[in-house]
Image: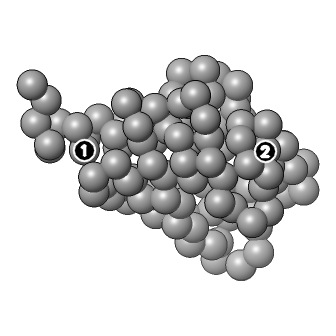
Amino acid sequence: MVSDNERLEGNKKIVDSFYQRALFERDVDAAIRLYGGKVYTQHTPFAADGFDGLRAYVEWIHKTYPNTRGEIKRVFAEGDYVLLHCHFTGFFGENGDAIIDIFRVEDGKVVEH
C-alpha cells in the first residue's frame, strides 16, 4: 500500500517530468506518451482543450518567444493537485516572470492543467 506521502511525491515527480519534457525540452509528444492521461482538460485561456491544444500552445510559445527559458523553483502537492512555481526569462519582464501552473494527476497521469 502506498502512503499518502509517497503518492504526493510520486505526483510531484510525474508533473515535474511532464513539464520539463514538454516545455523545457520541447518534446510534447514524449511528455504526453509518458505522463499524459486519457484526457487532458486545459484551463489556460490561450490554449485549446486537450493534448492537441497543448501541442499548439507549446509550439506557439517557442515560435513567438524563441529565447524563452524556464526553471522550476518549487513543487507543491496536495491531494491530486500539483502546483509548480517557475521562473521564466524571455517573455515580458526584464527580470523574468514568475509563473504558477496547477495540474491534476489521476492514476499516475496528468489529466488537467
Residue 31 falls in image quadrant? top right
Query: Whole-percent x and y of residue 28?
Result: 70, 32
Q: Report the quarter where the N terminus lies.
A: top left
The residue located at (69%, 61%) in the rendering is 44
For the residues bearing labels 2 and 1, Cβ distance under 8 angstroms:
no
Asked if 100 appears above or below 24 in the picture, the reply is below
Q: Is residue 19 visible?
A: yes
Mark number displayed over residue 8? 1
How many numbered marks are there? 2
| Residue drawn at 52 percent across, 66 percent down | 100
Q: CA distance from mark 2 to mark 1?
A: 27 Å
In the displayed structure, does residue 98 sit left or right of residue 64?
left
Residue under the image location 79 percent in, 37 percent down: 52
Q: Quadrant of residue 59?
A: top right
Residue 18 in the figure: left or right of residue 65: left
Q: Secondary structure at mark 1?
A: helix
Q: Position of residue 102 (x, y in %)?
A: 49, 59
**Pointer 2 local density, CA inside 10 Å: few below 14, some 14–19, many at least 20:** some
- Residue carrying label 2: 53
Earlier along the polypeptide chain: callout 2 or callout 1? 1
Q: In the image, what residue type sits under mark 1?
A: Leu
Q: Residue at horizontal 46%, vertical 63%?
A: 85
Question: Residue 110 at what x, y percent from top left?
Answer: 50, 38
Residue 86 appears in the figure: no
Q: Secondary structure at mark 2?
A: helix
Question: What is the crowding at mark 1: few (fewer than 14 residues within 10 Å), some, or many (at least 20)?
Answer: many
Q: Residue furthest right?
A: 64
Q: Amino acid at mark 2?
A: Gly
Q: Is residue 12 above or below residue 42?
A: above
Q: Residue furthest bottom?
A: 94
- Which sits in the foreground, 110 or 57? 110
Residue 73, percent from left and from top:
42, 59
